[in-house]
Image: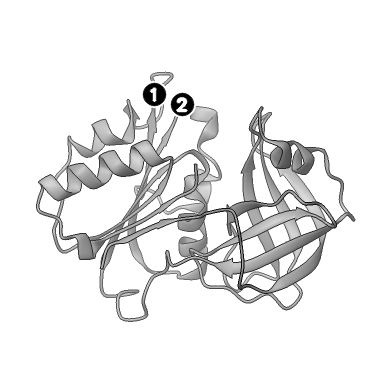
């Protein structure tokens, strides 16, 4: 079964929580982490929630950035100029009440694979969120993160990863570990058919990565993808 999932933006069967915003931490001028009270929300690393201000009709999907055992819930948000929800989130203040639907999504790691497999996490932009949650939730997993951004400043919380396990690909400047897109970097390295490949980010990147991996005889059973934008 190919794990290529699409978040449709309409949640029908899920749990609704009301949660207070605790803190906003800016990573760049338009990217920030929002921390909420966890309350009763239980999730598995890799899942996502839909989020919006209380009584707002506008909700948007965000991968959970925090770990399964953290006392709070965190999401990583990038402001989209045409995006009504992201602007509302950017302007929100601690103490405001939000509605959370979830958790949802199938981009998870099975118990059998957790400590027996090597994971290659491939992300663009804020698509790194589920992988940050994996690493926070499962200390000791064997992983490499390949993260594609435009600028070095977008290496969000890269210090949270073990040395040598985070590969930064920058397309807008010659900094990081590789100058170019993640797809260009992927073409320069060997791929092991025994590894598990998790891909999250914009749709074009995901389809390109899937194409590269399939041409290298990586089984679709070993590719797990989720599209957010």
User: Is 109 in front, or is 58?
Assistant: 58
- Could you tell me how far apart the alpha carbons at marks 1 and 2 are, in whole angstroms? 5 Å
**Number of numbered discs visible in the structure rendering:** 2
**Residue 81 x/y as whole percent:** 66, 27
Q: Residue at x 30, y 42 (%)?
A: 207
At numbered mark 2, what does the secondary structure look like: helix, strand or loop? Answer: loop
Local crowd size for mark 1, using a 10 Å CA cut-off: few (<14), some (14–19), many (≥20): some
Q: Quadrant of residue 40?
A: bottom right
**Residue 124 x/y as whole percent:** 43, 40
For disc 2, the marked residue is 150
Q: Residue furthest bottom?
A: 112
**Residue 227 x/y as whole percent:** 44, 49
Q: Residue at x 63, y 72 (%)?
A: 14
Q: Residue furthest right?
A: 95
208 w.r.t. 22: above or below: above
Q: Quadrant of the N terminus?
A: bottom left
At numbered mark 1, what does the secondary structure look like: helix, strand or loop? Answer: loop
**Residue 84 x/y as whole percent:** 72, 37
| Lower sequence index among marks 1 and 2 | 2
Q: Which circle marks residue 171 in the picture?
A: 1
Q: Quadrant of residue 29?
A: top right
Local crowd size for mark 2, using a 10 Å CA cut-off: few (<14), some (14–19), many (≥20): many
19 w.r.t. 92: above or below: below
User: Is 176 in front, or is 210?
Assistant: 210
194 w.r.t. 162: above or below: below
Q: Residue at x 53, y 33 (%)?
A: 154
Q: Is residue 88 left or right of residue 108?
A: right
CB atoms of marks 1 and 2 within 8 Å: yes
């Amino acid at each position: 079964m190919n794990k290529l999932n699409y978040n449709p933006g309409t949640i029908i069967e899920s749990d609704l929580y009301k949660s207070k915003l605790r803190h906003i931490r800016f990573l760049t001028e338009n990217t920030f982490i929002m921390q909420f009270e966890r309350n009763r929300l239980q999730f598995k690393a890799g899942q996502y929630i839909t989020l919006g201000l209380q009584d707002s009709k506008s909700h948007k999907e965000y991968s959970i950035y925090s770990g399964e055992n953290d006392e709070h819930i965190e999401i990583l948000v990038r402001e989209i100029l045409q995006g009504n929800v992201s602007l509302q989130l950017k302007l929100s203040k601690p103490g405001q009440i939000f509605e959370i639907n979830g958790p949802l999504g199938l981009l998870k790691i099975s118990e059998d694979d957790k400590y027996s497999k090597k994971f290659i996490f491939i992300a663009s932009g804020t698509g790194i969120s589920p992988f940050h949650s994996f690493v926070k939730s499962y200390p000791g997993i064997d992983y490499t993160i390949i993260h594609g951004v435009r600028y070095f400043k977008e290496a969000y919380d890269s210090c949270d990863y073990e040395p040598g396990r985070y590969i930064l690909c920058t397309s807008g400047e010659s900094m990081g570990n590789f100058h170019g897109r993640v797809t260009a970097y992927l073409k320069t390295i060997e791929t092991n058919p025994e590894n598990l490949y998790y891909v999250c980010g914009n749709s074009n990147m995901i389809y390109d990565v899937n194409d590269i991996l399939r041409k290298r005889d990586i089984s679709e059973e070993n590719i797990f993808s989720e599209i957010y934008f």
